[in-house]
């Protein structure tokens, strides 16, 4: 009788799980510890402009500081990519509340606004740079423009290593190819992508991490990136990094202009439910 009741209880649990609509919390029982990677692009000062309020990829300094303060106040550890690599490849443990902070493209606002906030809280982050824009600027750093996006000059990067790792978002292959919805990187030959990535390394201090331009990738890109020494590459698909993650298809959560603090907390506290494939 007791065994029958046990089986009935197990059946009820299974029915409740199946009633969840095919969703699961990625990482819980699917590779263990979950690491949220937070993806930002542009940071702006809302007190000085209203022009960026409709830009979904722009986050105000007020919102960004509140998010970083939440991480600091709640004991989150901001990872370097060396720590992530040790976790993925060597089985090294990480602090329970570990998180990655990323910026894609390499806008000057990351260094003007995000850098001092991150430095204040003792946090680490990575900027995935489109290095062709660094080369184009040369020694000239345009002033911050509160209404437009501004790129970052090489000399601006100097002295930011206490906060920022600088990794590749391609050198000159981020744009969409003419007449296509695919990036130049996606359509490039193996030789072209290898050359482009090597060229980007001239401006960077991290040569093992890569963010796919516009999130687009294919098997040919992965093989070319392996050849130049990339060991981890990031998409723009929502999801957590776990030990079972494919290191060339690592997922990130984009933080948008409209991301509420409640949703931000759900992401970092690993409460987002990801649809199973």
Image: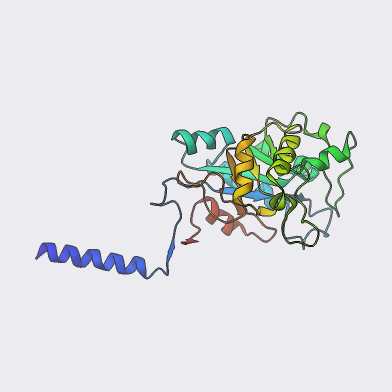
Classify residue 192 as left or right of residue 72. Answer: right
**By what rule are the colours in the image chosen?**
rainbow
- Answer whether residue 82 is visible to the viewer in this image: yes
**Residue at position x 57%, y 56% in the image:** 238
Residue that sits furthest to the left in the current view: 1
Q: Position of residue 192 (x, y in %)?
A: 73, 43
Q: Position of residue 200 (x, y in %)?
A: 74, 37
**Residue at position x 52%, y 51% in the image:** 240
Q: Position of residue 42 (x, y in %)?
A: 75, 50
Image-quadrant location for residue 111: top right
**Residue at position x 67%, y 36% in the image:** 120
Q: Position of residue 72 (x, y in %)?
A: 58, 41
Classify residue 40 as left or right of residue 9. Answer: right
Classify residue 155 as left or right of residue 61. Answer: right
How many numbered callouts? Answer: 0
Of residue 5 and residue 84, the one placed in the foreground of this image is 84
Image-quadrant location for residue 53: bottom right
Residue 17 lies, with reference to residue 128, above or below; the image says below
Of residue 60 and residue 213, the one placed in the foreground of this image is 213
- Answer whether residue 80 is visible to the viewer in this image: no
Residue 90 lies, with reference to residue 3, above or below; the image says above
């Amino acid at each position: 009788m007791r065994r029958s009741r046990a089986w009935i209880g197990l059946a009820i649990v299974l029915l409740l799980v199946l009633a969840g609509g095919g969703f699961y919390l990625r990482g819980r029982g699917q590779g263990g510890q979950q690491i949220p990677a937070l993806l930002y692009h542009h940071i702006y000062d809302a007190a000085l402009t209203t022009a960026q309020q409709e830009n979904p990829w722009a986050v105000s300094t007020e919102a960004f500081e509140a998010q970083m303060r939440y991480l600091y106040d709640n004991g989150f550890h901001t990872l370097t990519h060396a720590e992530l690599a040790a976790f993925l490849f060597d089985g090294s443990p990480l602090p329970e509340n570990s998180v990655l902070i990323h910026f894609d493209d390499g806008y000057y606002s990351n260094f003007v606004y995000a850098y001092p906030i991150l430095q204040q809280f003792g946090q680490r982050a990575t900027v995935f740079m489109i290095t062709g824009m660094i080369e184009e600027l040369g020694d000239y750093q345009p002033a911050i423009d509160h209404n437009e996006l501004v790129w970052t000059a090489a000399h601006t990067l100097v002295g930011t290593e206490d906060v920022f790792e600088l990794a590749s978002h391609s050198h000159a292959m981020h744009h969409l190819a003419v007449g296509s919805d695919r990036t130049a990187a996606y359509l490039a030959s193996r030789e072209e992508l290898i050359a482009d990535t090597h060229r980007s390394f001239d401006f960077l201090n991290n040569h093992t991490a890569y963010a796919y331009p516009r999130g687009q990738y294919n098997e040919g890109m992965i093989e070319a990136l392996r050849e130049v020494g990339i060991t981890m590459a990031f998409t723009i698909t929502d999801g957590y990094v776990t030990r079972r993650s494919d290191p060339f298809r690592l997922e990130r959560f984009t933080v948008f202009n409209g991301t509420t603090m409640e949703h931000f907390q759900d992401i970092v506290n690993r409460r987002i439910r990801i649809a199973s494939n």
